[in-house]
Amino acid sequence: MSETPANMTLEQTAELAGAIRAEVGKAVVGMDMVVDHLLIALIAHGHVLMEGPPGTAKTFLAQCFAHATGMEFGRIQFTPDLLPGDILGSNLFNFQTSQFTLTRGPIFRELLLADEINRTPPKTQAALLEAMQERRVTLDGETHSLSDNFMVVATQNPIENQGVYPLPEAQLDRFAFKLLVPYPSAEEETRIVKRFGERSGPQGPTDFGIAHVASTASISAAQAAVKEVTLSDDVVNYCVALVRATRDSADIASGASPRAAVILANAARARAALEGRAYVIPDDVKALATACLRHRLLLSPAAEIEGKQVEDLVAGLIEQTEAPR
């Protein structure tokens, strides 16, 4: 780059995003939209919840994304017997120094993969709340800061309902997006088999030639470049109108919070920046609304009986809400 990372332009931000997409695409097939949302969440200081059946490369995608962005990667396999200390760490007594020393848990990473997050009890799930909202951890009354780029990518399996603990609304609201990872198309699945079938043993990002095309400094610079993106009052009002519409729908028992409107606006700015655009358009909001709202809405009993889907209701609210020109 001709400029230092601290002075990254919107054009350079878009180029960086393109480079990350290209690296992840060396290994991951057919998940372009998911990768785009991960990029937007990263630039907007958000977290992502991915839901999909087993074997759809959710974990592998997170590993490749972390490797391409140059972020320090940590993974926690959530299980029913997992304790908060297994995530946060603990203060252990050092007999040589006669002092307590902090043993940091896996949460002290830049990108934390919370694998099968709904398999652990609420007490352990709640250990992530402070970290996700304030990017810090409190242990024994002492506060420890996390990276400014700290990001949680959580996964869950929608098929099994035994031995799982659904995430409470307070924690779901901390995720910028909930992304649905479906089975690939026949053409994509053929490409996957050809790409992976020739290999044996464990396969990681480096096996596919994925390189570090970003760094902590360049990610921070891209996040700073978002400040150059103009968010007009009309678009702000549009975000607010969409979120408020979720509270007025008879099919929705509990609508989205003001936090949802803030996240939607910030994500729309990040999307514009990643496209090299210095202003937000209504299409930015429309493109992100479903992923931003689907996990924040509770259907009414009548809507559940009728078999209505949250995604269809959000699409209807987008059509009904007048967008600025």
Image (cartoon, rainbow, N blue to C red):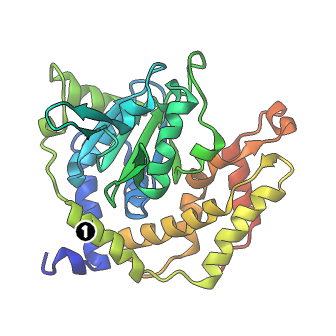
Left or right for 177, reference 17:
right
Q: Say which quarter of the image contains residue 89.
A: top left
Image x and y of residue 78, in percent? 43, 27
Q: Residues within 10 Å of mark 1 (few under 14, many from 20)?
A: some
**Quarter of the N terminus within the rendering:** bottom left
Image x and y of residue 90, in percent? 34, 35
Image x and y of residue 314, in percent? 69, 53
Q: Can you say whether 43 is above or below 4 in the image?
A: above
Left or right for 211, reference 233:
left
Q: Can you say whether 77 is above or below 235 in the image?
A: above
Q: Can you say whether 219 is above or below 191 in the image?
A: below
**Quarter of the C terminus within the rendering:** bottom right
Foreground: 110 or 267? Answer: 110
Answer whether residue 255 is visible to the viewer in this image. yes
Residue at 25% in and 68% down:
15
Judged from this view, the residue extending furthest toward the front is: 98
- Counting the numbered discs, the total is 1
Q: Say which quarter of the image contains residue 79.
A: top left
Answer whether residue 57 is visible to the viewer in this image. no
Residue at 83% in and 54% down:
249
Image x and y of residue 19, in percent? 22, 59
Residue at 72% in and 69% down:
241
Q: Say which quarter of the image contains residue 106.
A: top left
Mark 1 lies on residue: 15
Foreground: 224 or 200? Answer: 224
Foreground: 284 or 50? Answer: 50
Judged from this view, the residue extending furthest toward the top is: 162
Query: The disc labelled 1 sits on which kind of residue?
Result: Glu
Left or right for 18, reference 183:
left
